[in-house]
Amino acid sequence: MSAQKETLGFQTEVKQLLKLMIHSLYSNKEIFLRELISNASDAADKLRFEGMAKPELFEEDPELKIRITFDKDARTVTIADNGIGMNREEVVANIGTIAKSGTKAFFEQLSGDAKKDANLIGQFGVGFYSAFIVADKVTLTTRRAGETVATRWESHGEGEYTLEQVEKAGRGTEIVLHLKEGEDELLNDWRLKGIVRKYSDHISIPIEMKKGAGYGENGEVTNSDELEVVNSASALWTRSKNDITDEQYQEFYKHVAHDFTDPLAWSHARVEGRQEYTELLYIPSRAPFDLYDRERKQGVKLYVRRVFIMEDTEKLMPHYLRFVRGVIDSNDLPLNVSREILQESKDIDAIRAGCVKKVLGLLEDLSANQPEKYAAFWKEFGQVLKEGVGEDFANKERIAKLLRFTTTASESEEPTVTLADYIGRMKEGQDKIYYITADTLAAAKNSPHLEVFKKKGVEVLLLTDRVDEWVVGSLFEFDGKQLQSVAKGALDLGKLEDEADKEAQKQVEEASKPVVEKVQKALGDKVKEVRATARLVESPACLVAGEHDMSAHLERMLKAAGQKIEGSKPTLEINPEHVLVKKLAEESDEARAGDLAAVLYDQALLAEGGKLEDPASFVKRINKLMLELSA
Ligand code: ADP
């Protein structure tokens, strides 16, 4: 078959990425080498894994390695590996398209401001394309292990690439970077070796380079073609903690996590006991763009005795810790462990439980000793960690202690209050942790339900994250104190209420029987019940959900998510002390009383963020009342 050259177009997003990346990452251009070496190392991992079942894939070349060379005259730098390689389909799928889900949405976030975008791009991961930071032409030649034909991919990074079928003796991938004008400093032995040592020392296979310039026995300058290994070439996590610098931990993170930024914190331990394993787990400093994408990959890699087995499995980390990155290397699991075996494995359950404890321990340590770092963590991942309260029964208490809230006592909107802080500030006689859920902080803060709590100086948690309903639905109590919604059930302030309060409530109920009946009649079956309340101070009315009903907020969220639910009817509580309610009590015209009652109900619904069933009628009634006022 003749080797025909074919020209193909990049996916739109790739074009965008290339352009942006070249502009925004230029100041950090040496990272291209780290990215390409990282890919080569992954390719070696994949071959080692596939080679367990098919040893013939090694093609009598079992020593996995990476080689870097340069050619001063041709002005090229070449990175070659003998890893798994790619066939034609894989080249098209991997280099030329971005298959990550959520890519489109990600690109819509880009602003055109190079600095901001550089940050975002780091979060997205640029990988192979970073070659175009320093090269104006890239030639990638690759042959998949076990196959005979090789593929050459070539591009100037400007919208198109060519594909060609070629011969290649060794398996794996070779990438030739034709350097841009002005990048000649890279054609230097010391410079390249320096970059490799700085960013890629942790790579577990040897990175070879020619010995290059040196001095011979008699002091003469030599130029040796002999190869030397430039990196430490041992898996970082197998080394002793004392032998690893922070910089090395950070660089290794960037490799395993495909992230550009330094991690926030890490935990590295060799665990002995029933299961022997090493874990090196990282908390990133920034949430990836697809944290909420259901299809996103999990970030912890499983190794068995240094051999990479798999990533992307929920068996290693629970869903609520899906932001954790790193490596777990087991000494006991069989090398041929499959996803199916993992699914059933008690051993992996034990490893996972141990690693979850390590991560929670790391977070506890941050929260106790590095509050600023913990605040940064909370900002990025707090909402995800919250899911754990419902997901991880065994660690519920520990997770609850890690939660942070904004409350009515907070000075800023930052969530900094722990449940323990809250309990420490509880009023005498208070035996519950009060909370309110709402769509926004403003809606929560100004809710009529808070009025009596403000009056009594009782702190209330303001819950505005979507996940909060799930949290309060799972965490019924903390430290023996029950969590209580302020918008559910009859107001029960327990011992916070003194005799005078109770007496007042009783009198209010007695005295307002007629107006309650009037409103009840006007609203009919819109509400379950109407009752007079002492919980309101400034507002005329509010809606209250039944003690065991779904909260109105949750009901709205579920409806917005497209779920059909039969909402339960709320109770309307009215404040007999309010002038409007007094007016209503005095109103003898039945139609006007009906209008006033309907407005009270609609207002109460609006005040808690609800949606009116019939907004036009509401407007009409308000206008009518306003006209009467001015008449
Ligand atoms: P990422 O590494 O984040 O997936 P890249 O753009 O760096 O993104 O690479 C895309 C894909 O191309 C990789 O996931 C891998 O499948 C493939 N690839 C890149 N470099 C190599 C290589 N040296 N050998 C084999 N496959 C490679």
Image (cartoon, rainbow, N blue to C red):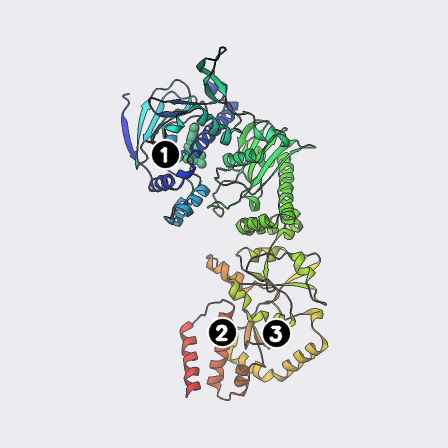
Q: Earlier in the sequence, mark 3 or mark 2?
A: 3
Residue neighbourhood size for the residue with mark 3, other residues' Cα within 10 Å, grouped as few (<14), some (14–19), many (≥20): many
Q: Quadrant of residue 8?
A: top left
Where the N terminus falls, by quadrant?
A: top left
Horizontal side of 347 relative to 526 (left or right) equals: right
Residue neighbourhood size for the residue with mark 2, other residues' Cα within 10 Å, grouped as few (<14), some (14–19), many (≥20): many
Q: Calculate the distance from the C-alpha at mark 3 to the C-alpha at mark 1.
A: 65 Å
Specify the amino acid type for callout 1: Phe
Is label 2 in a helix, a strand or a loop? helix
**Visible in this render: residue 174?**
no
Camera-side residue: 489 or 217?
A: 217
Q: x%, y% of residue 553?
A: 53, 63
Q: Earlier in the sequence, mark 1 or mark 2?
A: 1
Tell me the mark number nearer the camera, choosing from 1 and 2: 1
> Can you identify the residue that label 1 sits on?
132
Contact check, label 1 and label 2, Cβ < 8 Å: no
Camera-side residue: 310 or 366?
A: 366
Is label 1 in a helix, a strand or a loop? helix
Q: Earlier in the sequence, mark 3 or mark 1?
A: 1
Q: Calculate the distance from the C-alpha at mark 3 to the C-alpha at mark 2.
A: 17 Å
Specify the amino acid type for callout 3: Arg
Of all residues shown, which one is farthest toward the top?
218
Residue neighbourhood size for the residue with mark 1, other residues' Cα within 10 Å, grouped as few (<14), some (14–19), many (≥20): many
Q: x%, y% of residue 74?
A: 33, 23
Q: x%, y% of residue 606?
A: 48, 70
Contact check, label 3 and label 1, Cβ < 8 Å: no
Specify the amino acid type for callout 2: Gln
Q: What numbered label is drawn on residue 535?
A: 3
